[in-house]
Amino acid sequence: MQHSFGNTLRLIQQNNVHRTFTQMVRGIEKESLRIEPNGHLAQTPHPSALGSALTHPSITTDYSEALLEFITPTFTDTDAMLEHLDKVHRYTYQQLDNEKLWVNSMPCIMGDESNIPIAQYGSSNVGRMKHVYRHGLWHRYGRLMQTIAGIHYNVSMPDAFWPEYQSLLKNEDSLQDFISSQYFGLIRNFQRFVGLVIYLFGASPTVCGSFLKGREHTLENFNESTLYLPYGTSLRMSDLGYQNDAQADLTISYNSLSEYVDTLTAAIQTPHSAYQQMGVKAPEKPGEENYRQLNTNILQIENEYYGSIRPKRVARSGEKPTCALATRGVEYIEMRCVDLNPFEPIGITAEKIRFLDVFAVLCLLEPSASISASEQLEIDSNRDAIVMEGRKPGLMLQQGDKSVPFSEWSLSLLDKMASIANLMDEAGKTTIYADSIAVQRQKINNPEQTPSAKIIKTLKDKDCGFYHFAMEQAIEAEQHFRERPLAKDDFAFFQQQSQQSLKEQTNIENSDTLSFEQYLNEYFEKKPCTN
């Protein structure tokens, strides 16, 4: 049964289902580049004091040895989650000597891309697979793109919510199928509405000229060292650097779990001519570094597909993500559209997290029809318009056969979010969610309050380029963390995590019984999973 948004919200309130909202589960994955004192990308290996990037539960690397990724456990308390993230930063700074963490999403002063060190994960088969996968990303997309940093926000509805919500909707599917179906409805609406998040929180309207040196682009010169778009919000979410014909023609369906698994599996199993010509190995290179990519298919593995949101399920050891989803359903969603806010030391605030929580609930409760090919083109066009000129006065979005002012569209969504926020506050006996919506509402008619506008204004006021602004923010963040070393017990906790992770990596390496080639063959020969 399909309910209207208003009716669904009334049913939730009347049946006291909103009391479960206080137990939403959330976690953060936050990336930051390590840089030298002069702002150049660090060339040093991942610090051993930070443990094993393969097995550490809190500190790993993404594409590069220099691209740190901090991972929080899951929390029901937003402040506790951000406190943990703060402590990870403080511990890291106690191990970095004179290096700093870059606090912007877009990198700077990269030099030749061959100087970007690809992440290493040791000699185990699983570690080598992660490394070779990144070689494939290099050969397919270039290394520069992979140094763009962001925040991935993971969130799920409480277990107690689902049976009650299913009963309200009079749905008779299995609980697992119902949950997965509802998450995919959320994902479709997220795609429709994500432009609001990009406008409100986008913080990458400028880029260092060195990032696009020698490449075609449509950006304007801010000054001799900096490129920008006057009304841009999040160049990180644009196609800068993500130029790849294989993915441009790829259509992954979010209309159901089965369609998602099937279309993603097809991309992982379908060869691409350009990658076939490249080959899996470079025959002229002997030894372990001769792998160019894991395979010659459109996608090497599931994670290669770039999107603003992903359905997720924690996979078991050796299990493919698609198999985890197909057999046990969606567990949570991963929002991938969040820029680092350079004005905030850890890149994000509790107020923003609360807004994203309400946004997730909006996407869940709003009716969500399947996305047709024509609607997908509309969704992509609207998102690109907000990315490239979201603060432009009079910006119009396409909604079916009519055009709608961006401000009208945004305020309509925020009105619905305010209703949700009131219920969440009622459940928690607070006002923090309504307050978070009220703050963001001010940005619709006052675009100068957005992070993207503040960055451009700062550059103009200080008569500087992106590099000098970013370095100043990085130095401020460094001071923020270095001036607050961890308490003895907290330091010992993270130190123990690091030491234990190194032992776990060694155990994995010692337990391998297959050659790397055999390991890959067995991994990719596993039967595809179907829902």
Image (spheres, grey):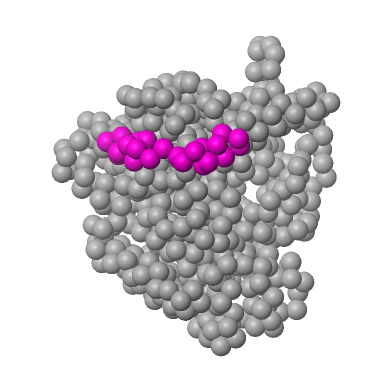
Q: Which residues are magenta?
A: 472-497
Q: Give coordinates of residue 24: x percent, y percent.
A: 57, 65
402 relative position to 71: left or right: left
Magenta segment, principal secondary structure? helix
Q: Give coordinates of residue 366: x percent, y percent.
A: 53, 74
Decide: is 366 above or below 328.
below
Query: Does the segment drawn in magenta span residue 297?
Result: no
Residue found at x 73% / y 67%? 177
Q: Does residue 411 appear anywhere in the picture? A: yes
Residue 220 or 22: which is nearer the viewer? 22
Residue 137 or 321: which is nearer the viewer? 321
209 relative position to 59: left or right: left
Count of numbered marks: 0
Residue found at x 59% / y 30%? 51
Q: Give coordinates of residue 180: x percent, y percent.
A: 68, 64
346 relative position to 262: left or right: left
Query: Does the segment drawn in magenta span residue 477?
Result: yes
